[in-house]
Amino acid sequence: MGKNSVNRKVYGWLDERFKLDDLINFMKKKEVPLYRGTIWYYFGGITLLLFIIQVVTGMLLLLYYKGSSELAFESVRFISAKVKFGWLIRSIHSWSANLMVLSAFIHMFSVFFTKAYKKPRELTWYSGFLLLVLAMGFGFTGYLLPWNELSLFATKVGTDIPKTIPLVGGFIMNLLRGGEEVSGSTLSRFFGFHVALLPGIFTVILALHLVLIQRQGMAAPENWDELPESRKKKIPFFPNFLLRDLLIWLIIINVLSVLAVFFPWDLGTKADELAPAPAGIKPEWYFLFMFQTLKIIPAKLFVIDGEVFGVMLFSIAGLLWFLVPLMDRKTKSGEKSYWLIYSGIFVIIYIIVFTIVGFIAK
Amino acid sequence: MNEIPGYTEKSSRRDFLNYVLSIGFFGWIVAILYPLYSYLVPPKSPDVDVSNISIGKASEIENNSSKMFKMGNKPGILIKTKEGELRAFSATCTHLDCTVQFNKEENLIWCACHNGKYDLNGKNISGPPPSPLTPFNINVQKDEIYILK
């Protein structure tokens, strides 16, 4: 019996039970618009690939990692120094995490500027926003797990910020820290959040996000509404676009390997709860623009604390960004909404400038 | 209104049952949420209330230098000024909880996280810190330094 006939038999067995033909017909029907903005469609898939890599390498790290303040640093050092290719797995996990956040940001801004969030895709935008927040939560909790000096202070600052929320702030801080101070209890909690709580929630929302995209198909560019059918170039999602996706995945895996091998992730020095914050301390780059803003806001602004002002500013900005599909009334009624595009450009410039300033600042 | 005999009675009995069941359901929700909430709140750690500790000999600390110590769960900083005067503060920055350090060159207390600066009296003088560092009392007995809250 040839390989093909085995395949056909397996396919036939499955098709009889699950009607695979329907699914394949559905995928074939789905089309991806082909125009100069098509490149932006790949970033969702790239983010997905990097997430899958995170899950796989994360599971591998779990085989050796120990989540307690006495053993965490030593276990990560053991992974990097003693376990064969441990340094590579860890380095890939760290690099892939950073690239995933970057790719998610690009994906988000491309959706923003192509206005792909508008009706009927509002829920896709909301779920995507939640996924980005969760991804940053992954980054924040994962950063502490090696229990090094930098991560200890990043966590102190990060978990102190909710304290500015009136009434429930102290409670939230305690809940995150597992006590008044950042300590071994915080590490245990963050470990739990990082490997159980966040992945659970993330997977559910990701499934919703993907189902919505499959159900509704790709958003066409804005000016396509006026084009005649004959001028709209499209390719089938299956197999054409999927094959292109896979080719890009291959490139990303190569880029990731090169980065992980030639720029292995540093371990730093073990956290000492008594030591002062080291000079030049910085959070992960995707928190840098917020960090830098907090740095330049003076202690008092009119009557409120600068810190409270900064946190309020970013909370409101985040909420407005989340609600973009609701605010964009002009696009709904077919007009161009310039102020939204300008604010999007402002947000990008702000993030880039403050990230760079954060990098070069002493 | 009451064309059907017994209708009002029946419906009030149903209302009563619904009412009782709602209270029961609400109680059931509380019975689940309360233990969950209590479990999430960490128990208070026992060693928070330290008020008096010994941290070493005064003669062993050089002028214009500092020493970190632990006051309960929180870090503290002892500074010996150029003139040889001892001062102690909570080392927790009042901005966002980082740990401060003594900056010899600038002769001030500095927080590396957000560039907050305090003078040697613990007063916030520049950067984002909203309030001064909490000072501790110092008691030197036979060269041994005791820090008092």
Image: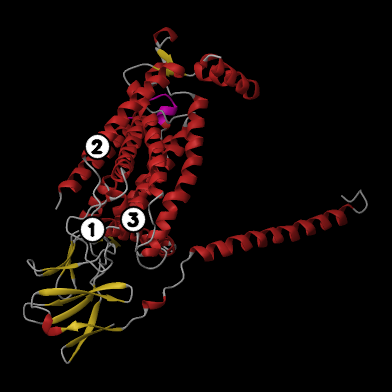
Of all residues shown, which one is farthest toward the bottom? Answer: B142
- On screen, residue A265 above or below B51: above
Q: Nearer the viewer, mark 1 or mark 3?
A: 3
Q: Is residue A335 magenta-colored?
A: yes
Q: What residue is disc 2 on?
A: A259
Is label 3 in a helix, a strand or a loop? Answer: helix
Q: What residue is disc 3 on?
A: A75
Question: Residue at horizontal 32%, vertical 31%?
Answer: A253
Q: CA distance from mark 1 to mark 3?
A: 13 Å
Q: What residue is disc 1 on?
A: A269
Span of residues in magenta: A330-338
* Discs 1 and 3 lie in a common subunit: yes
Q: Residue A135: horizontal and vertical position, in percent?
A: 38, 44
* Residue A101 marker: none
Q: Residue A263: horizontal and vertical position, in percent?
A: 21, 41
- On screen, residue B147 above or below A239: below
- Identity, as a three-letter code, of the amino acid under mark 3: Ser
Q: Residue A200: horizontal and vertical position, in percent?
A: 49, 46
Q: Would residue A164 appear left or right of A26 to someone viewing this image?
A: left
- Identity, as a three-letter code, of the amino acid under mark 2: Leu
Q: Nearer the viewer, mark 3 or mark 2?
A: 3
Q: Chain of mark 2?
A: A
- Identity, as a three-letter code, of the amino acid under mark 1: Thr
Q: CA distance from mark 2 to mark 1?
A: 22 Å
Quarter of image, res B118: bottom left
Question: Residue at horizontal 19%, vertical 87%?
Answer: B144
Is label 1 in a helix, a strand or a loop? Answer: loop
* Image quadrant in which the N terminus of chain A is located: top right
Mark 3, residues whose alpha carbon is within 10 Å: few (<14), some, or many (≥20)? some
Q: Chain of mark 3?
A: A
Which tag, 2 or 1, sits closer to the chain's start?
2
- On screen, residue B144 above or below A361: below
